[in-house]
Amino acid sequence: MSAAEPPDAYPPALAAAWSELAGSAVGDSGESALDRLRPHVARLSDLFTLARPAGDFPDYLADPALLAAYGEFFFPQSWTRAGWAMAHASLRGWAPASRRPRILDLGSGPGSCGLRAARWLAAAGGLPGELMLVDRSSSALAAAARVAEAAAPGWGVACRVADVRAPAQWPEGRFDLVVAGFVLNELGLDEPALDRWVDEVAARLEPGGLIILIEPALRATAERLRRLSDRRTARSPRRIGPEVDDAPCPMLGGDHWDHEVRRWQAPADAAFLNRRLHRDLGAVRFSLALLSDATLPPLPEGAARVVAEPQLLKGLFRLVLSAGGRLRTVEIPTRGLGRRAAKDLAAAFERGDLVAVPPGDGRRLPDPASVRRLGP
């Protein structure tokens, strides 16, 4: 992971570009423009959660006010989720083989995931390459083109209006990275058809290329992605993360489901919009799958993934881990650490982290040094 580019870093120039676009959409500027966008943010929030349509999603980004609301409030969250996905890939040792990588963002909307991936690769020391954005919404792609230079300077960004369900409409050639953010839940495909769709995506990969699939953290969407991820352990490209091995997900069918929860600091405009909306902006939540046939270095012995909220309880710190198709709860005594040190220990871990712990079935670990955070 590049120390110069944390997963949740949001460029000021990109924030300014969306602020300008929002002002044009509502005929206002500054906080007055944001005040006018609040009901549109609320409408989108309901559409993405409580009022999700049973069939196809409408082209909500064709409405300039809804597009501006998305850009100011939801774009930074999707950008951050894609940053964590790239951090997972970097932690596993993946990097594009091409000197100037090509990225394909399927169902891109205004380009939050593809642009974030492009910026990540540049911050990690790569040269600017080519990013192809594909979406059915011409207005979303037009917005992406307007903010692209602020998001990923120097990258060649091209846009194509197409149906992501129809591979014949996708761009030609092969890509080092294909990302699909919040797309699978809108495709409406059964599991066999979804597998075929992913195979079509895989056919666009360069050797050693990577597919990143990001989905909502809702139980239905997260479990569908986890089942897909489990099936890919026997297919090409195979699963490389965020799980630490090829074992089936032990949380499927249980009381809880597997997803990421990452703390973040919302950009100023999003935080202002949220003053009266009272949405939870303390963390971004999502589910994730990474697929590749690249040869990657092995994880350290005892690698496991944190799959529940870390808990700081009286006298101990608790983590629930997944590895080898099993869940394991480990506890670290905190007596003698002091209140500040115990809080610092708890703050060092998040749901989705990879860690290394002593192998075995033991629940109680001797001290904080027994758990080593690997990342991302």
Image (tube, grey):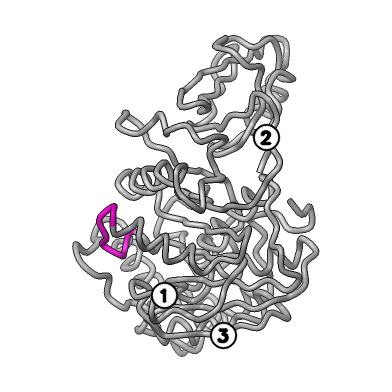
Q: Main secondary structure of the magenta part?
A: helix
Give percent across and percent down for residue 52. Answer: 25, 61
Give percent across and percent down for residue 32. Answer: 49, 78
In the picture provided, is 224 more to the left or to the right than 337?
left
Query: Magenta segment: does it hold 189?
Result: yes
**With respect to residue 92, does 318 lie above or below?**
above
Q: Find residue 192 and report its image quarter.
A: bottom left
Task: State the separation of the CA atoms marked 3 and 1.
Answer: 28 Å
Residue type at the position of mark 3: Ala
Give percent across and percent down for residue 187. Answer: 30, 65
Q: Earlier in the sequence, mark 3 or mark 2?
A: 3
Instruction: Tell me the quarter of the image containing the C terminus.
Output: top right
Q: Find residue 312 and report its image quarter.
A: top right
Residue placed most toward the observer, 120 or 150: 120
**With respect to residue 260, does 167 lie above or below?**
below
Instruction: Answer whether labels 3 and 2 touch (C-beta < 8 Å).
Output: no
Q: Write the start and end of the magenta stretch as one range.
A: 185-192
Residue placed most toward the observer, 21 or 52: 52
Q: Earlier in the sequence, mark 1 or mark 2?
A: 1
- Residue 37 badge: 1
Query: In front of the other: label 3 or label 1?
Result: 3
Residue type at the position of mark 2: Leu
Tag 2 residue:
299
Q: Residue at 57% x, 73% y: name it.
A: 174
Badge 3 element? strand
- Residue 158 badge: 3
Instruction: Answer whether labels 3 and 1 touch (C-beta < 8 Å).
Output: no
Give percent across and percent down for residue 354. Answer: 62, 35
- Residue 189 badge: none
Residue placed most toward the observer, 248 or 155: 248
Query: In front of the other: label 1 or label 2?
Result: 2
